[in-house]
Amino acid sequence: MFRSSAVTGRGRCCFACSPNVGPRWPFTIDAIVLLPDHLHTIWTLPESDANYSRRWGWLKKEFTKGWLADGNSEQQGSAGRVRKRYRGVFQPRFWEHLIRDEDDFIRHADYIHFNPVKHGYAKSAWDWEWSSFRQQVAKGWYPQDWAAGEGNDYADIAEQAGE
């Protein structure tokens, strides 16, 4: 998702600015993980509102403004991207999947929380600070040692989530 490393510094604003879409475009973050070069999230939008694009656009705009104001860099964009006034921080698109049922939610939440382990950023989901995993442990949805230690079977988690 990101074109620049965003876990340190201003990257934290992803967690801070997301609730600030406020009453205009409300949503709930059900699961999220922020990695150095991308993020994954599950949102719940209000009934009869499926406008993910507006919310992503706002979040990407606000994040990019803060990121660049803090002196961070962006990647060089193509002439077409520059003409459209796209900045070189985020990819221009996102992937959307409608969660079908509770089992589908669990598969995708597992995939999200396992991602830092998969990419070698953490030895367990608990070790990765930039994730909703700790909040979900506090709610009793996961044990703290989930996806910890040897024998993590990412292939099963990814396959179940549809990767």
Image: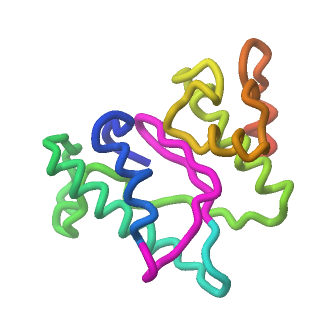
Query: Can residue 26 be seen?
Result: yes
Answer above or below: position of 58 versus 2.
Answer: below
Looking at the image, which residue is at 55% across and 71% down?
27
Query: Can residue 154 be seen?
Result: no
Is 11 left or right of 115, judged from the image as shown? Answer: left
Is 112 or 76 nearer to us in this picture? Answer: 112
The quadrant of the image that shows the C terminus is top right
Looking at this view, name the residue that lies furthest to the top.
150
Q: Position of residue 147 (x, y in %)?
A: 73, 26
Q: Look at the image and name its color scheme.
A: rainbow
Answer above or below: position of 163 versus 84.
Answer: above
Is 116 left or right of 25, judged from the image as shown? Answer: right
Looking at the image, which residue is at 19% across and 66% down?
85
Confirm whether the magenta stretch covers residue 30. Answer: yes
Q: Position of residue 36 (x, y in %)?
A: 41, 34
Is 52 or 149 nearer to us in this picture? Answer: 149
Answer above or below: position of 24 versus 83.
Answer: below
Confirm whether the magenta stretch covers residue 87. Answer: no
**Which residues are drawn in magenta?**
22-43
Can you tell which quarter of the image residue 5 is in?
top left
